[in-house]
Amino acid sequence: MMRLALGFVAVLFPLLASACAADKECQDWTKLAVENPAVGCEGACTQAKRFDKYDYHAGLIAAQKSRTGLEKFFRYTARSTIMGAGSDELACHMYALLLQWGDAQFANTLTKSGAKATTRVVGLLDYTAVTDFKRRFPRTYGLVSQHEE
């Protein structure tokens, strides 16, 4: 019985550790973006301001503070022209928001933001290669098939 338990831990520990590492990486990057946008939000903040006339930094902060802010951030994402390195930042920030708000609140707020926002946000989360996305965040993951373009 002890062997079975040790075997189970030996198999699951790397999976759990990698999920935590990926989670922490995006959470840390998002925290840096909020505290020092010149470093943690260089691409997304600059591109949003220049091409979309949007204050990405303020939007990210608002998305962390309230569901209304989160919904507005989702709606911006639907019209965003962010690309390249900025997309990496945006995807990671979305993942950090999912971790912060939790699957149910994140998915409920996202569905209020429209089909295009839903498709883009879930696509960004998929791009970040969320570990066990379907299992860990079933409500958000389930939005994919509901809003495919």
Image: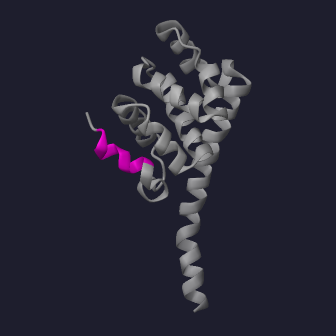
Drawn side of residue 15 relative to residue 28, left or right: left
In the displayed structure, would residue 15 be above or below residue 56?
below
Residue furthest left in the image:
149
Please give the range of residues in magenta. 140-147
Viewer-closest of 137 and 44: 137
Locate residue 130, reporting x and y percent. Answer: 48, 48
In the displayed structure, would residue 149 be above or below residue 136?
above
The type of colouring in the image is: one colour
Residue furthest right in the image:
35
Drawn side of residue 114 relative to residue 130, left or right: left
User: Is the stretch drawn in magenta largely helix, strand or loop?
Assistant: helix
Locate residue 37, reporting x and y percent. Answer: 67, 21
Viewer-closest of 36 and 63: 63
Locate residue 78, reporting x and y percent. Answer: 41, 25
Locate residue 11, reporting x and y percent. Answer: 52, 71
Residue at image position (49%, 33%) is: 91
Residue at image position (46%, 25%) is: 75
When asked about the image quadrant of residue 70, the answer is top right
Q: Quadrant of the C terminus?
A: top left
Q: Quadrant of the N terminus?
A: bottom right
Residue at image position (45%, 40%) is: 125
Residue 143 lies in the magenta-colored region: yes
Viewer-closest of 114 and 22: 114
Residue at image position (74%, 26%) is: 35
Marks counted in the figure total: 0
Drawn side of residue 140 relative to residue 17, left or right: left
Residue 94 lies in the magenta-colored region: no
In the displayed structure, would residue 126 be above or below residue 84?
below
